[in-house]
Image (spheres, rainbow, N blue to C red):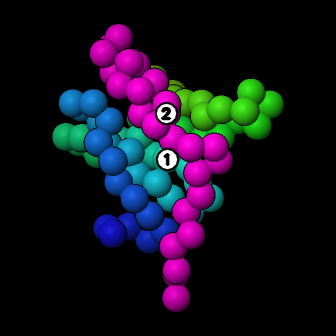
């Protein structure tokens, strides 16, 4: 693990990486620059995961498809239970 509170890292398509953090959120980063692109989180009213992009970000169709595919692999309300001691 490379960051405090980080639980798991997964590839998202060719250009992005997802890092799960405590609380079950997934932070989506650009693979090259590691800049934050947005967050995937559980949205209870819709009973599914949603992607909340950062301001002033733009996504091509293939990146949106990769994000949708990634979210489809997530179970219901993913949680991170890392021991922080």
**48 vs 18: above or below:** above
Is 32 situated left or right of 16 in this image?
A: left
Magenta region includes residue 64: yes
On the image, the x and y values in percent for residue 56 come to 45, 23
Residue 38 appearing in the image: no
Relative placement, left or right, of 62 versus 47 is left
Mark positioned earlier in the residue sequence (2 or 1): 1
Q: How many marks?
A: 2
Label 2 Cα neighbours within 10 Å, binned few <14 / some 14-19 / many ≥20: some
Nearer to me, 76 or 45 = 76
Q: Observer-nearest residue: 30 or 18?
A: 18
What residue is at 63 percent from the left and 43 percent from the top?
A: 76
Secondary structure found at label 2: helix
Q: Quadrant of the N terminus?
A: bottom left
**Tag shown at residue 45:** none
Magenta stretch?
58-85
Percent coordinates x, y for residue 73 in the rendering: 46, 37
Residue pictured at 19% horizontal, 40% vertical: 32
**Category of crowding for the residue at label 1, using alpha-carbon neighbours closer than 10 angstroms: few (below 14), some (14–19), many (at least 20):** many
Residue at the spot of label 1: 26
Residue lying furthest bottom? 85
The image quadrant that residue 43 belongs to is top right
76 in the magenta segment = yes
Which residue does the image show at 44% across and 64% down from the upper left? 6
Q: Position of residue 23 (x, y in %)?
A: 62, 58
Most distant residue in the right direction: 45
Tell me the element at label 1: strand
Residue at position x 46%, y 46% in the image: 27
Would you name the residue on which mark 2 appears? 71
Residue 52 percent across, percent down from the top left: 57, 31
User: In this orientation, does residue 7 appear?
Assistant: yes
Between marks 2 and 1 in the image, the one whose residue lies nearer the viewer:
2
């Amino acid at each position: 693990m490379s960051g405090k509170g980080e639980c798991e890292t997964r590839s998202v398509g060719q250009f992005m990486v997802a890092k799960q953090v405590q609380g079950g959120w997934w932070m989506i980063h650009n693979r090259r620059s590691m800049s934050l692109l947005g967050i995937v989180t559980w949205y209870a009213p819709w009973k599914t995961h949603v992607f909340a992009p950062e301001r002033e970000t733009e996504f091509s169709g293939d990146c949106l498809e990769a994000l949708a595919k990634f979210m489809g692999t997530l179970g219901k309300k993913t949680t991170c239970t890392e021991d922080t001691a």
